[in-house]
Amino acid sequence: MCGIVGYVGPKSTVDVLLGGLKRLEYRGYDSAGVSVINHQGQLETRKKAGKLTKLVEDIEKAPLGESNIGIGHTRWATHGAPTDGNAHPHLGGEHQKLSLIHNGIIENFSELKTELLLQGAVFASETDSEAAAHLVAAQYAKTGDLTESFRTVVRRLHGAFTILVVHEDEPGLVLAARRNAPLVIGLGDGENFLGSDVAAFVEHTKRAIAVGQDEIVILKAGSVEIENFNGEKVTHEEFTVDWDASAASKGGWSSFMAKEIADQPQSVGDTLMARVSSDGYVNLEELASISKLIPNIDRIIMVACGTAAYASEVGKYAIEAWAKIPVSVELSHEFRYRQPILTPNTLVVAVSQSGETMDTLMATRYAKEAGASVLSICNTQGATLAREADAVLYTHAGPEVAVASTKAFTAQITAIFLLGLHLATVRGTQPKEDLQVIGKELLKLPGDIADVLTTTDSTRALAKKFKDARTVLFLGRHVGFPIALEGALKLKELAYIHSEGFAAGELKHGPIALIEEGQPVIVIVPSPSDPDSLHAKVVSNIQEVKARGAQVIAIAEQGDAEVSKYAAEVIYVPAIHKMLAPILNVIPLQIFAMELAAAKGLDVDQPRNLAKSVTVE
Ligand code: F6R
């Protein structure tokens, strides 16, 4: 968590830093701060608890000096409450000439702090990060070499960190280091940038380099050097960012979430693009590096957290049905602690929007060490997960700024469907023509999503109606089950309402006891044409809860007359292949949660206590 940005170049540094922080605010919004070295060579620092707007207002009232170098931070609090004092940057040294920002957790900070206190350092915050600022300053006081001092200190730090430092004595230099936390360089013309991800600088440059594990960056306006923690030079290939800067702005929408929900025809379409031919044939060139493994895969384990885990759950049904490979889905943070059995024929599929979720990264490192191959499904170019995997299948959802995932979720499901069809094609587990029928159905998705998005009035009205609900239950079967879980998660995180998703078949095994008069229950109804008669079973479930007083809202296929007999409200979505229905069914649930939260006056883009990228375990 936490977003970091660094800049050196001719532009107004405060504007570059605040612009970058705005785009990174999804990573944490407990406080924000910047340090610049002004044209008089003095370090100026400003930091404020609360969202970035507080800092912006403060700077507008009392502007910082003109400058061409600086660092900025937006915080998700770990050590120390979200106060002005605990906000970054932190200053170090007797004359406070050094400024430092940090993303991550310094695990040995208490031992380092004790050592510094004994040496007389005075701490102004309760953070772990401040220890690093004092350490670099103290080392520099001894050696007079800032880069060497920085190198020495980062070698002593344990845990996860991206650290940026500027110092009055070196007014043209930003130093950065990374271990287990993200850092990307933006390459400009006579200017250079640093960011937690490319969103920090995409407005200024699309040329980027992803910094590797345990590496240091020496950033100046006219040069960028990368070295490892031992000071040996390192080179990495540059890549071109394919995100459009305007995609990371609200563009007239009331919130990023509203925009991102509306983006879904495009993001699903972009994820399909060049991967499915017009006759429905799927080919994933990105999987070339694991092509030898594909015929031999005997098991797939998908690792992910939160919404990405629900996308994986949907994918499990599809991959097993099409490619006939056993699939299990594991929460990344549980996976490696139960000593899973992995072999060279196990494919671990790590699904992550950010590609920086620490739990998922650790799960994939564990899998690789145990001899499995890793395919990552990721939305962020240059992310650590993408770089560490044996192969990457990018989702092309564009930047997702709202903390609650929407367009990344549907893009993830789309990518997993493509994976399932590709595996089935290569392994010959289904007649090609049958797979092409599904491939063609995939191509219908952008248009069908657009249709769902044009008929949202009743969903919005329902959200307002249920704004005071204390609890909402969600039911689904088959691929509708993970959608029930996702609908419940969206409502929890956005509207702070207790909500639970259940497999509808589980109802009579316990959860039905929760039903009382007036209880809202949202049911994902399978298509009436479902060959396994799941539709009839779910309609029975609706009757069972209705008989006990539930108010049922059904998400059902257009033309499903049966369901309207029992549900109080029905939200219809277009008919599509049963495996693909989750992508259409989830959209009313996203809108329901967003509108309900908005009706309660809540901030839908930045729900309380959350950060978008969970980069600590
Ligand atoms: C919920 C949400 C989270 C993320 C989870 C994984 O709306 O966004 O549950 O899905 O933290 O994040 P990534 O996909 O970045 O690994």
Image: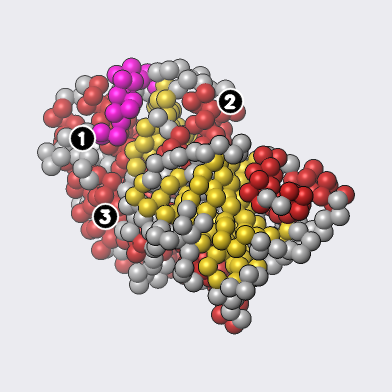
In the rendered structure, which disc, 3 or 2, sits on the residue that comes first in sequence?
Answer: 3
User: In x, y percent, where is residue 28?
Assistant: 56, 58
Residue nearer the viewer, 30 or 181: 181
Residue 265 has which mark? 3
Identified by mark 2, the residue type is Arg
Crowding at label 2, few (<14), some or many (≥20) Cα neighbours within 10 Å? Answer: few
Which portion, as a residue range, is magenta? 284-299
Residue at left 62%, top 43%?
A: 160
Please indicate whether residue 416 sits to the left or right of residue 490 in the image.
Answer: left
- Is 172 drawn above or below residue 515 in the view shown? below
Q: Is residue 545 visible?
A: no
Q: Quadrant of the C terminus?
A: top right
Q: Secondary structure at mark 1?
A: loop
Question: Magenta stretch: residue 526 in it?
Answer: no
Q: Which residue is mark 2?
A: 338
Please indicate whether residue 113 sits to the left or right of residue 225 in the image.
Answer: right
